[in-house]
Image (tube, grey):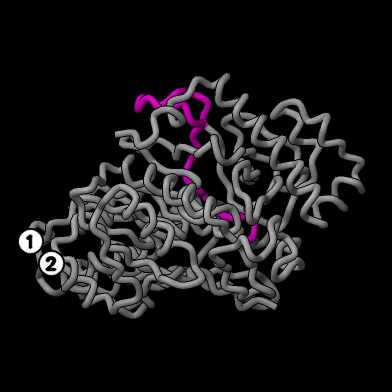
Amino acid sequence: MIYSREYESMLREDLEQLQLERLQATLNRVYRNVAFYKQSFDRLGVDIEKIKGIGDLKQLPFTTKDDLRDSYPYDMFAVPLRDIVRIHSTSGTTGNPIVVGYTRNDITIWASLVARVLTAAGITSQDFVQIAFHYGLFTGGFGFHYGAEKIGASVIPSSTEDVRKQITILKDYKTSALISTPGYALHIGVLLEEQKIHPEQLFLKKGIFGAEPWSESLRAQIEEKLHIEAYDNYGLTEVLGPGVAFECPQRDGLHVNEDHVIVEVVHPETLEPLGYGEEGELVFTTITKQGFPLIRFRTGDISSLIEAPCKCGRTLVRMKRITGRTDDMIIVEGNNVFPMQIEQILLDMKGAAPHYQIILKREEGLDAMQINLELSEKLASFDEIRGLQKFEEEVGERIYRELGIRAGVNLVEPMTIRRSEGGKLERVIDLRD
């Protein structure tokens, strides 16, 4: 199903012309109304009237998270505060939070884009949608709420309820679609097993998960434990919230809503634009946002773009699933690795539970990595210490073979690693100076 066929299946040449028209309008708006962009354009000698095509984007400056933090709270807003009807923000754990403003028109567009996400996953007005994202300054809860109401679905804003209460709601309220972080969905699945509730006793059919990177192996675990189809989606508070990109039933990359954002991939170090299939940092330019428009925003997320058309009929470009972030790359003894790469290996090992934590420390002046990995029920009942040690060695050997990093693997008792309670999990603890 396609929510907005006119735009989601638009001819590429028509889409690119629409993007250019909207980009030019946005550039004029930010130059007139946002001091940061006026100063940035003038400093680089950018003449916005000479931006005649999408290929000219490389003439424009980047916007970084630090730029947005320095503008705290309202310096990046492009409209008077009286026109702002909603404010969201990031957590601010690494400095000032990034404050994002929405006009009434921004909210309307946001709802329609999330409606595309839900429709692509097969969710309709007949569904009961349980949203287990936090409702607050974080955009996830409200964004999906707007989209679900837009398509006429029944919304269950379970938000921060205890995980056991979430399961009660799943059963009693006849929830057919769950929306949360993937880690939280896995937590629900494990608890269902403990309570001996078979997934077939539920009405759950679909799940849309995001707000943190997750691997195909984790998708398979969630689908097995909940007996659902699990869909990925991508969004950022700075750009919009949920609704930037989404999976269709093909589940072969995420369609970017290009009629509202322009996506680029650049080399994380040289910042030079990369072509289709080349992995680098995602960069977004918003072209319809009024309250908080962004020009070439560096996301820090690592992905690549897929050129081939999708079988679903959408002509929107696809991005591959996020493989990591430029700021969560682990460097151990000169080797670069992302937590997602380690997760993929751990979850592919038969007998490993999908709960782990990576500890980085220094031993005698050298980097050392330790991975605490929960025992599965199968291994927990295996009494032979030698067998457990062999399993630890096998995991460590595979990590070294595939990633070139030596890691000590420590099997820990079930339920000893912190579970997701709806927010993002801290998978990596760096104890090095």
Q: Residue furthest left?
A: 201
Q: Nearer the viewer, mark 2 or mark 1?
A: 2
Please state which amino acid type lies under the numbered disc 1.
Gln
Residue 254, given in percent of the width and then of the height, sits at 44, 40
Taking the spot 28% from the left edge, 55% from the top edge, the residue there is: 221
**In which quadrant is the N terminus drawn?**
top left
**Is the Cβ of the residue at disc 2 closer than 8 Å to that at disc 1?**
yes
Please state the total of marks drawn on the protein image: 2
Q: Residue 314 colored magenta?
A: yes
Picture residue at 16% right of the left edge, 68% below the top: 193
Q: Secondary structure at mark 1?
A: helix
Look at 57% across and 31% down and name the residue there. 277
Mark 2: which secondary structure? helix
Residue 308 painted magenta: yes
Position of the C terminus, as image quadrant, is: bottom right
Q: Residue at x 57, y 73 (%)?
A: 91
Residue position for label 1: 201
Q: Name the foreground residue: 299 vs 143.
A: 143
Q: Which residue is mark 2?
A: 171
Residue closer to the observer: 377 or 401: 377
Residue 231's mark? none
Classify 10 Å Cα crowding around label 1: few (below 14), some (14-19), many (20 and above): few
Q: Is residue 23 left or right of residue 319?
A: right
Between the C-alphas of marks 2 and 1, the distance is 8 Å
Q: Is residue 243 above or below residue 15?
A: below
* Snapshot quadrant of residue 162: bottom left
